[in-house]
């Protein structure tokens, strides 16, 4: 599931701002990056399964993970984890409680990023 009305889509910010804002809200960056792309994950465990809210960023100037790198925030996506295969995004039915939590988390992320710019 893709979230398109978040206030985050296509914003360009310093990687350090996106990183700090995401981690302050419980997202994990971990080792999910290369020099052009990175992903911030928020894990949610629900009685219907484990879900991941992912916020991808793409470098528009510089290399990730340098603090001064400018990144574009891409549309966040929600997926369901299936052990041992991974996360599926398409053709899934997501619990409304998970969708609501994602929308709140993304709203907070957008506000946090804007306040740090």
Image (cartoon, rainbow, N blue to C red):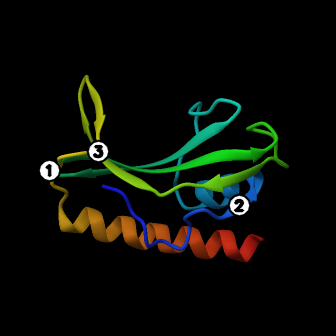
Q: Earlier in the sequence, mark 1 or mark 3?
A: 1
Q: Secondary structure at mark 3?
A: loop
Left or right of 10 on screen, residue 92: left
Q: Which residue is mark 3?
A: 89
Left or right of 24 on screen, residue 67: right
Q: Earlier in the sequence, mark 2 or mark 3?
A: 2
Residue drawn at x 42%, y 66% is 4
Q: Position of residue 68 (x, y in %)?
A: 85, 49
State how far apart marks 1 and 2 are (Cα): 35 Å
Q: Position of residue 8 (x, y in %)?
A: 56, 67
Residue drawn at x 54%, y 73% is 7
Q: Is residue 28 above or below residue 96?
A: above
Q: Secondary structure at mark 1?
A: loop
Left or right of 60 on screen, residue 88: left
Q: Which residue is mark 1?
A: 48
Estimate how packed mark 3 is, as few (under 14), some (14 to 19) or many (20 or more) residues with alpha carbons within 10 Å. some
Nearer the observer, disc 1 or disc 3? Answer: 3
């Amino acid at each position: 599931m893709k979230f398109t009305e978040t206030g985050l889509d296509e914003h360009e910010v310093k990687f350090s701002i996106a990183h700090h804002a995401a981690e302050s809200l419980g997202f994990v960056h971990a080792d999910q990056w290369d020099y052009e792309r990175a992903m911030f994950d928020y894990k949610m465990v629900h009685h219907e399964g484990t879900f991941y809210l992912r916020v991808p960023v793409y470098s528009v100037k510089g290399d990730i993970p340098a603090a001064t790198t400018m990144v574009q925030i891409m549309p966040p996506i929600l997926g369901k984890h299936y052990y041992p295969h991974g996360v599926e995004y398409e053709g899934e039915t997501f619990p409304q409680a998970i969708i609501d939590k994602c929308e709140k988390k993304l709203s907070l992320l957008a506000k946090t990023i804007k306040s740090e710019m």
